[in-house]
Amino acid sequence: MTHKNAHTTQRGALLLEGLIGILLFSVGILAVVALQGSATKAVTQAKFRSDASLLADQLIGQIWSNRSNATAYAFCGGGGAPAVLNNWMTEVNTRLPNSNVYPPCVAVVPTVYAGPPAYTANQVTVTLSWQLPDELARVPTPPPHSVTFSTVINWCPTLAC
């Protein structure tokens, strides 16, 4: 009489369960690594957006404090930047990657209001663009990231305004 044990018919089941467990664990670890990479990229992009916002706000503050000469800040990438922008442009090129490929644009549009009293207001628009090195190397190159700030700066040479 032949007698079969139950454990002999299930040879390798424990090994198979172990391999499936290792496979599931490995897929989970790969997902966590991919999530970490995405989170790092998002934090990097947020840092550059924050830096661009700070730089644009810094320039608008400079223009506000020198509002009688606001038009001296006008620059949209053609030729050399005005002397009043040299330090700011250096900081932009230091803090934003590939911003020299996409130079900043500072538009200053004066508008004279008849009043009374008559005064001049300048519409100041600052646009900063940048691109991460890995994005610049892609074919086709995706559009650059950009931040645009716009404000109206009033200027009145007398205290009557």
Image (cartoon, helix red, strand yellow):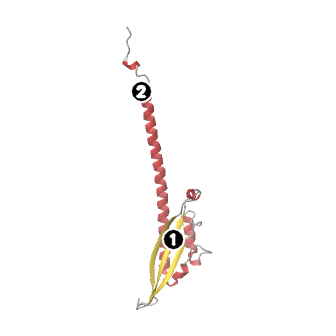
Are circles 2 and 1 on residues that touch, CB within 8 Å?
A: no
Task: Give the percent coordinates (x, y) of residue 61.
Answer: 47, 76
The quarter of the picture where the C terminus appears is bottom left
User: Counting residues from the N terminus, which is met first, the one under dot 2 or under dot 1?
Assistant: 2
Q: In which quarter of the image is the N terminus?
A: top left
Q: Is residue 66 visible?
A: no
Residue at 49%, 83% (x, y): give it. 110
The residue beneath circle 1 is: 127
Residue at the (47%, 84%) spot, across then down? 111
Determine whether the residue tagged by mark 1 lies in a helix, strand or loop. strand
The amino acid type of the residue labelled 1 equals Thr
Residue 89 place in picture, x, y as percent: 56, 71
In the image, 82: left or right of 150? right
Q: Distance between the residues labelled 2 and 1?
A: 63 Å
Above or below 128: residue 110: below
Residue at image point 49% right, 73% down:
58
Q: Which residue is drawn at 44% across and 24% down?
A: 12
Q: Position of residue 79 (x, y in %)?
A: 62, 75
Indicate the secondary structure of the residue bearing disc 2.
helix
Query: Label 2 belongs to which residue?
Result: 14
Q: x%, y% of residue 27? A: 45, 40
Position of 75 relative to 51 (above/below): below
- Type of amino acid at the residue the image marks with label 2: Leu
| Residue 79 in the image: above or below residue 95 | below
